[in-house]
Amino acid sequence: MKRFAALVAVLALVAFAAPAFAANPFMDVPMNHWAYDAVSQLASRGVVSGYPDGAFKGEWKATRYEMASVVARALAYVDMNKASKQDLELLKKLVVEFKDELDALGVKVDELDARVADLEKGVGKWYFSGYLRMQQTFGRDIMQGGVLKEDDDSWNVNRFRWNIKKVIDDKVTMNIRLQGGGGEDLGVELAYLTVKFPWDITANIGRFWLDWEGDFYATDWWGFAMDDAYITDIRPTMAVSFNKSFGMGDFSLYVAHDDNAGPGEDILAKGRFPFFGTDPEGFGPAVGVDWALASNLTSDRYIYGARLNFNFNEMFSLALNYMKYDYEDNAGVGVYYTFWNKQNGWLPNVVAYGPKNYFQFATLAADVETIWGDLVINFKPGITLKGQYFMQDNDPAWQATGLLGGGVAYDDSPSAWKAVLEIDQDVLGFTSLWLEYAQLDAGFVFPNGASPYGWMAGDYFCNDYGQVEADTTLWMVLAMQRWSEKWGTYVRYLDVDGSQDYNNWTVAVTHWYTPSLAFELGYDKLGGDLDDDFIWLRTTVFF
Amino acid sequence: MRRILFSIVVVAVFLSLAVPVGAAPYDEVLHRWQKTQKFTDRGDALSITVTYFSSEYIEALIQSEADKNLWTADEMDLHKYQLLKTLRLDDTIPVRFHFEVMGSAVHMAPFGEQLKLRIGSKTYNPVDYDPIFNFRVTESVEGMVYFPRFDEKTGKDLLAGVGTIKLELSGSISLTIKPTKVDFIWDVANDDPSRIYTGQAGGRLEMDRLIKRLANLNKEKQECEKRLGELDSEIAAIEIRMKELQQQ
């Protein structure tokens, strides 16, 4: 009844307000007109509220003005999260059908069209996506409480990722990612704006990943850091980047400020001496003491980067890059010592250390400056040769690591290079292939603080802080096979000849049970100076 | 080191000369115009393939479909006609996007504002695209995007005398993409779209264009005739009125 009264009121208003040019404003919409069904369909799917299914199925016959008012209201209250492509098409069709009446109602059809267009484009919407990953590992040797546990099994929720995106308007997009799991608390990993400026300049502002070397490292299906960038792929920190395109080239700038490094994050020099006895901190039997000279407490730093990339044609591209990790002058430097109880030659990165003891005594800057070139040659479709050459200029404090730790003076201008041959599966028919060879000078620093090679076995040729401990050569072969939409496999072999000589075989089978649910079963074998093998199973659901 | 580098180059050259295993004669041409970029991010993955419809690609595509389906010459011609109609090559530069999502869902809306075609120093936004790209992608989606072929003001062919073009896709479409943007590059200097407008299909397409043009001309003619009629009646009315005034 109320609805009827409202319709009568609208009708009366419309009747007096209707301009003279509107032809036959009170003409009935025939009962078999598609508009009845269209509005009912939208109501039944919950896209518009207040018009339950069947609202227009009774004896009541609407005039074109009444129907237009219904359309106007539908557009005003449409639930954007429920509207599908078909719903939007229906709404657009209704707007077109009742355009004259909507005009007469004083509703600007252009605005409605724009609103429908916005709905279709997604402007103003919140988007959510992410994944949940569980991992079971069987038979891996680990240190726990200072004791080596052989063939340990571990089950955990490895990672939860929740992406949030909002297109603010045609120039600004906001992205946020919450992430946790695998020992990490749930927190904000990414939060940044992408802004389009005049003169073809795009900026990212906030916490985001910066990666200028994405073409130069190999990953499995999902990028579990089997290989990574040497200098970039910088962990999210508050930063600003600009990109300006010109013809076949691009120029990029990057500035970040990291005031969250924390005590002892940036090691300037470190060493180790034997100590047999009991850790006075109560951590059990100790076999040594580690000490480190570290930037401490106020280790703020700036990161500056610039990149010039030019594509000469579709076959050949060249890029020049510069990146500097610039520690502020007031960066504190101190010493810490830790009792050490790992087994000789075994998994140095999973040692259960005692608490670090700090003593700050000086201030010092410790910069890492890298210039490098990238070259890509696409020989023919599916076959690419790539190369990178790095030249580094490190602060003397960095190269003191070896001098104080083991009597080896590192060169403070180390270099590194790598060459990659990549072949698509389309070319060889049954497998893709990634062949990589790299040479790194002792003292070369991976400024991200860790080796770029692998979560399984890549960390042993550099120290825990990303500095290569001895001249190192490295081979990697990765062959991936996508057998069908449901099945994939890969084999990887990594051979490292550096401060430790070792190799790592990985074999894995992946099954996509549905496009949103994947299982991956893998086997890893560590050889050479290392000796371990284990099986792992990952289950990932995407949304 | 030299020996290793030399080995890599030798393998690369050998492979570049080798015929791909089990490859059909057209595969290499088809692959040449399809550019794929893959992105991974510690658990997320996205693959984007973009195809530029050069005349060489279209010919290879039609021929490969004909071989696969054992088409007759007439069937092949019909397929060519339908394909060319879909591509709208007479007034657009068409490209096909294929997104394969192997991770978190991707939301690219408004898709038309996420990409531009760079020809020389100028960029062009799409004139039309499949609205399917504006909706959530959880698996795989493909569709067409059309860029203008002629300059809006001068009517000049934008690809005339151009060597290389670059399609730029914004990195903000997905968190899996870390660079600010993704580029797809093609050398189009030797591409000649008029080459494919031959045979029956070409004739039919020309006929379609002529029918469309004829319809437009007829419409214009009717408008002119209507206006002429209006002017005639106005002239007649003026003459009548003038006669009336003369008689007074």
Image (cartoon, rainbow, N blue to C red):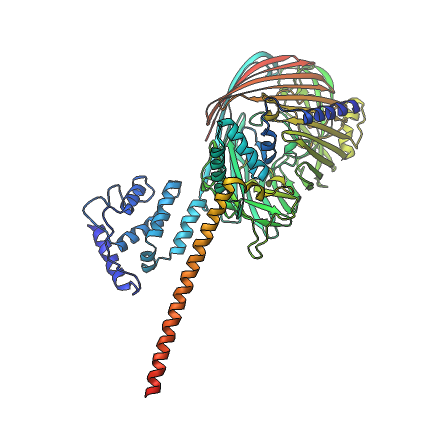
Residue A310: image location, x then y, percent = 69, 41
In the displayed orientation, state which residue is furthest to the top. A150
Side of A331 where A188 appears, left or right:
left
Of residues A345 and B248, which is closer to you in this image?
B248
Q: What is the number of callouts on the image?
A: 0
Residue B126 in the image: x percent, y percent? 52, 47
Residue at figure coordinates x 37%, y 78% from the top left:
B238
Q: Position of residue A163 (x, y in %)?
A: 49, 36
Of residues B7 and A286, the one drawn nearer to the viewer in this rendering: B7
Considering only vertical position in the picture, is A203 above or below B216?
A: above
Relative image position of residue A382 (x, y in whole percent): 63, 29
Instruction: Name the residue: 35% across, 83% down.
Output: B243
Q: Which of B100 and A273 is in front in this view?
A: B100
Tell whether A117 sits left or right of A45. Answer: right
Residue that extends furthest to the bottom in the rendered view of this protein: B248
**Which quadrant would the C terminus of chain B be assigned to in this image?**
bottom left
Is residue B81 visible in the rendered structure shown here? yes
Asked if residue A369 can be seen in this view, the reply is no
Q: On screen, A367 above or below A159?
A: below
Q: Quadrant of the N terminus of chain B?
A: top right
